[in-house]
Image (cartoon, helix red, strand yellow):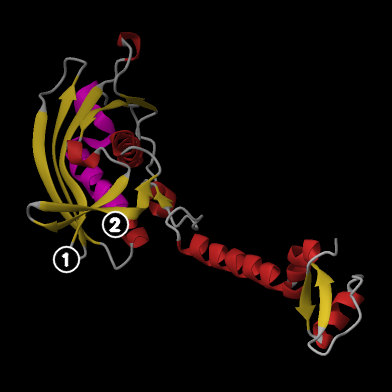
Amino acid sequence: MRPTMMAITAPRGAVLRAAGWRVAAPRAAGWRVAAPRVAAVRAALLGVAPLRAAVLVAAVLGLALSACSPLAPRPDRSRYYVLTPAAETRPEAAAVTPARALALGVGPVTIPDYLRRPEIATRVEAYRIERSATDYWAEPLETAIPRVLARDLAALVGPTRLVLHPWYTSARPDVQVAVDVQRFERTAGGDVELVARWTVTPLGGRGAARSGESRIAEPAGGDMEAAVAAQSRALARLAAEIAAVLAPGGKEFTGGP
């Protein structure tokens, strides 16, 4: 029984011969190939080039889509800032050691809950706060403010011993400075506002407690770095207002000469 044959034109027969196929003698209508090899012949005629091209196009499209995907890696544009004591930016702010040493305790220092976030806040309206998506505090404000305020007070009053709240009974300072920060952020107008109530209390049995409220506005400039520098300056001004109630070297509270 003769196998079924199919017609192949002469040019295609040349392709098949180049591919290693055995092709029957030509007829007037063209070439003939056995039917069992029809599928293989078609594959040879189509070739793998279109398939490779389709795979390449799919890969390129996949890369393009992945670049636009929200899950694709993106550069980290986060920036982190710290408050800085005035003595570190203005050497002339350093204090002269007083005749009688003062042990100064700073704290507790309380802040509003809306400031207990790492994102730096800006008051855009009287009743609305916006948080930055790229600018963050490198340390919590509830620890940064007491740290910087204590350094600024030390530079102004000149104690030889500085204690942060809470302290041990054995390390009780001569004077305690407690601060309640009510506002401490940049405004939409470009300034930094600091509102704080404070109390200076002698712990050694000398003198009376004194209280006050400070409202400080400091120009902040245009960018976040300038705003953070303005916040540091605002804390230095707060320290100056608190230190003003202390006699030079704290003699009023320590009983020094």
Q: Quadrant of residue 48?
A: bottom right
In the picture as drawn, the residue positioned furthest to the bottom comes out as 28
Quadrant location, the N terminus:
bottom right
- CA neighbours of label 1 inside 10 A, class few (<14), some (14 to 19), many (20+): few
**Residue 33: in sight, yes or no?**
yes
Q: Quadrant of residue 111?
A: top left
Front one among 200 and 1: 1
Front one among 105 and 256: 105
Q: Using residue 109 as the reference point, say whether residue 154 is left or right of it.
A: right
Q: Is residue 233 magenta?
A: yes
Residue picked out by circle 2: 230
Residue picked out by circle 1: 189
Quadrant location, the C terminus:
top left
Label 2 vs label 1: CA separation?
A: 14 Å
Q: Amino acid at mark 1?
A: Gly
Image: magenta residue range: 231-255
Q: Which mark is residue 215?
A: none
The secondary structure making up most of the magenta span is: helix
Provide the secondary structure element on which disc 1 rests. loop
